[in-house]
Image (spheres, grey):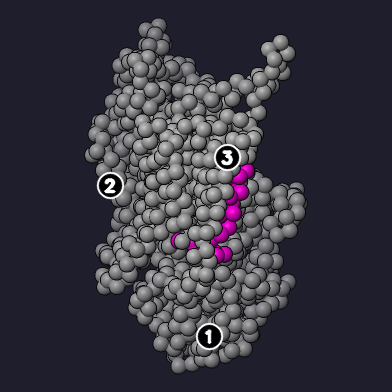
Amino acid sequence: MHSRLRWLIAPLLLIVFLFTACQGVMVTPADQQQEEVSTELNVLCTPQVEWCEGMKAEFEKANPDITVNFVRMSSGESLTRLRNERDNPQFDIWWGGPIDSFVAAKQEGLLEAYDAPNMANIKNPDLMLDPDHYWVGIYVGSLGFATNEDWLEENPGVEAPTSWDDLIQPEFEGQIMVAHPSSSGTSYTHLCTVLQLMGEEEGWEYDRQLAQNVLQFTKSGAAPAKFVGQGEAAVGIVFSHDIVAEQEAGSPLVLTFPQEGTGYEIGGMGLIKGAEHLDAAKKWFDWALEPETQGLGPKYDAFQAPTVEGAEASRPELLEVNLIDYDFLWCGEHKKEFVDKFTNEIAGAENLKK
Amino acid sequence: MAELPLEYTAADRPVPAWRTSLRRRYREFKLIGQDPILSMGLFLVGIFVFLFVFFPLLRVIWQGFFDPTTGAFSLKYFAQYVDPYYQAYHFQVLRDTITMGVMTAAGGTILGFIFAYTMVRCAVPYPRLLHYLTLLPTISPPFAIAIASILLFGRSGLITKDLLGIRFSPGVNDIYGLDGLVFVQIITYFSVAYLIIRGMLERLDPAMEEAALSLGASKFHIFHTVTLPLLIPGLAGAFLLLFVEALADLGNPLLISGNTSVLSAEIYLAINGQYDQQKGAALSLVLLIPTLTVFLLQRYWVSRRSYVSVTGKPTGGQLTVKEPYIRWSFITFTTLTLILILSLYTSILLGSFTRLWGIDYTPDLSHYGKALGRGLNAVLSTTFLSVIATPIAGLIGMVIAFLVVRKAFSGKEALDFTSNLGGAVPGTILGIGYIIAFIKAPTFVVGLLYALLAGYLVSRTVSNNRRRILIVATGTLIGYGLSRLPGVIFIDSFWRYLLALGTLVLAGAMFPFVPPARRRGAILALVIMAGGLIVYNLSPLLTEPLATWGRAMSNRTLSRLTIKTASAIRVFTQPTMTILGYTYLVAALFVVTRARERARAWIVTALLALCAALVFQGKPLALVGTPYIVIAAYAVRSTSATVRAGIAALQQIDPAIEEASTSLGADTQQTFRNITLPLILPAFIAGLIFAFARHMTSLSAIIFLTTAEWPILTVWILSEVEQGGMSTAAAYSMILIFIVLAAIGLMYAFVGQAFGAREGIDLTLGGG
């Protein structure tokens, strides 16, 4: 008994020592940490990598104390990442990608609301701003068709498609490229455009026929422009600004739009809930809504139209086409259902080119 | 395992069988426990394998049966295999996966055999050069061949379009699809089969064939009645291994499979596209079944059927094929295939220097500008993390190999098996497992490991069972209380200063209770432990100015390099508290055993308090997002290679040499350091090289784990294919190949003699 008592004294002394030691700092409140200014910012970037890189450089120029790390991920991947990391967020801000993903992220509580002063600049707040300020639109772009010029030359008699129906004609068998809607926001915009334009039943039937002409469903939405430019396929269904970017890079592409009307995307931006560098993320948020920042796009081969007053679209003609009345809410709500249906009935159908 | 109650029963009472067996096992561990370094090694390796192989795999399998949002048991995705609506698609994917695996394995084994036969039996000119060319696919990124095949044989490929003038109208077969995928997979993995079969062929005793020859059998008759049967285990082993590798690969299917889908890609899409952990996990289990079956077959059936004995005795010279038509047809075939492989790699090289492949072939350096501009962080991060993981994989491999070959204890087979499993299961599955297991703190596992280590510590240092329990309880409670303090009343760094101070106080208090002869080691260990905590706190004083300085630089390359250096330093100085805690717990054993018996109780209690405080601080082992999880994933993927390298090397050393050293009075450590280590060093180095190459090229396990701060090169290449185009991806691939080659050159320069050890080891690398 005696010996046991003796060795119990030691840990007790240790506790007493530690607790007396901490008296001194008990008053050191946690708010000392709060005032720390972040020197890093982790950006989840969904547009093309050149633009991500350019924005990183521009932001670092404007804020020399902050290092920006970014990862480019397609919008489906990004949403997955944010869901996975809900309890342990690795990113501070999500920049770019269609807003239906942001609508979903908001619903799932992955975003942090922020009343940015620059939100007053938004051109069309009904469409481009979340009423609760969880996300904001940063660019607009329309869907188009990219056709390889050389391929058109080699196949006289075939015209670049100007209607959705052209795409399901036999001359394009195995020549069309579009991304898979599960990973790509571009492709989901396409899927939802077709369903809105033709109605659900007819739209799915159309997609079934289109799938027979598809060479490969890519992972990233802009990839078909790249592959068509290289001649791996004849026609790609891509956002028109990505097609323009490929043209600028020297690819022989023709840009056309479907006359029945085409869908469009609004690219969003939102703060991540629980972000480690929230102060730096807010700086980026404010900065991204400035007209000068939005005017930087073309410098980095990004031809999306800006969403704030005072910034001019570099290619206004991309939006001066027949645009459908795209219902972002409807598309956002049905995303899982449509993507599942697509995966099981369209992408997995036996009739695809092997 | 160590805290099993050990009641000594009266000798006359019959002892139940299970109890004797338990006691035997306990004694085995006790025997290992007498050697502190060895037992520490066993513990650390055991923790590593459990945490990063066994536990994540278990979590994946578990997740397949439970709905992640509600937690309810559900067979949703398994039921889809019998639901007519989904059935067709699921079975088609399964069919395509198995077809791809079987065809790749068959094609790769045949090709590997032809290569091996040519190299060993056909007196080929320039054997060493051809040998290294054959190994090229093992050190290049897993999808390099896919990129090259698209560049050469794609729809606008150099050969298909520009040389042959093929136009891909409907109905013309192109490189995309199952056939293209099988072609790419064969080229990627056949060198694995080549290595295995070559090793077998070289060890084949020519006496049998000579005997048959002198009895008058024809060459062909000998080949299919003597040579081939002797080679069957090697061929079967190669076939099965290739099957596993092909099923596990993710990069090639993502790039070239067209509209065919295989399971690994489906899993990837389920997780990264549809965000469906349960689906991903369920599909993982479906993929795990054939993989595991084949893995077990290869391990326990084929390898036991080997007729080739490694005696170490030199066999008579190799037989060579005399008939010129056989010899030259083998040589021609091999050479032509090598030319194909070379042209594939050349196309990557050329592609990386071409402005716009397929359209504009002007030479252009801009792709390297991109790769070393925006990709520089990825290049640096990947190289750094791969380098860090290399010695870890090497050490773990050596310890496991040593334990497996030289020691007898229960669980040995399990340890060996699990460590091999880490490299054999499809990386996608492991990656998902890491996300599921380490996104939140796995409290149960953290506690379990702590309890095991703490139990072992007291059982080795304190004698009475009741005292043991009391000590663990007190120490853990104090420690747990301490671990909850930061963030509530302390700032983190002050909390660590306190712990460091406590450790130093302990060192002072211990002073009189340690015999002078052992004092230095014990005190030094405690000071180092305290130092670790202080360095953690002080390192921002170095890294922050360094990063600020880097940010201010005008040269962007230098700037990135400096910032990366700062975060690389942090990887060492600011490790995850939990890992630090476990390490300290193992080190505590070293400290306590040095103290006198009567003082041990309070020393152990204090040390347990320190370690528990570290282990349970914050969100223990919520590793996703940290570089440590990437390092762990790398090490797990390559440990199987280093284990096999170690086992092969150790088996060739006669234990008699070590026994002689021991009987002359050396302890295990001395024997290992002075006798064993020098003998196995070449194999060790070879294992390190392969481990590094495997780290740099691994994709599937890592793809879910990259972060903005630590981007991974292979993941970037995959995204560049779709974003920046083939040429940029080719530039990245060339940089990666160059880094791996440079590392190999560097290691060989240091250890020139490692050459000889390399060929005898069947190492399976490449994608994964």
The disc labelled 2 sits on which kind of residue? Ala
Tell me the subunit letter for badge 1: A
**Helix, strand or loop for disc 2:** helix
Q: Are marks 2 and 3 in contact (CB under 8 Å)?
A: no
Q: Amino acid at mark 1?
A: Ala
Which is in the foreground here, disc 1 or disc 3? Answer: 3
| Tag 1–tag 3 contact (CB < 8 Å) | no
| Spatial separation of the CA atoms under disc 2 and disc 3 | 62 Å
Residue at x 35%, y 17% (from the top left corner)? B665
Question: Disc 1 designates what residue?
Answer: A116
Residue nearer the viewer, B628 or B112: B628
The residue where tag 3 is placed is A6
Q: Quadrant of the N terminus of chain A?
A: top right
Query: Mark 2 or mark 3, which is nearer to you?
Result: 3
Expressed as whole percent of the image width and height from the top left, the position of residue B455 reads 58, 37
Three-letter amino acid code at the position of disc 3: Arg
Q: Does residue B336 lie above or below B259 as drawn?
A: above
Q: Is residue B482 magenta?
A: yes
Relative to B328, residue A336 above or below:
below
- Answer with the quarter of the image where residue B570 lies: bottom left
Q: Which of the labelled discs sits on residue B742, or is there none?
A: 2
Residue B500 place in picture, x, y as percent: 44, 52
Q: Nearer the viewer, residue B117 or B428?
A: B428
Q: Which residues are magenta?
A: B471-493
B178 left or right, relative to B215: right
Seen from the viewer's position, the closer of residues B612 and B268 is B612
> Distance from label 1 to label 3 (Cα)?
63 Å
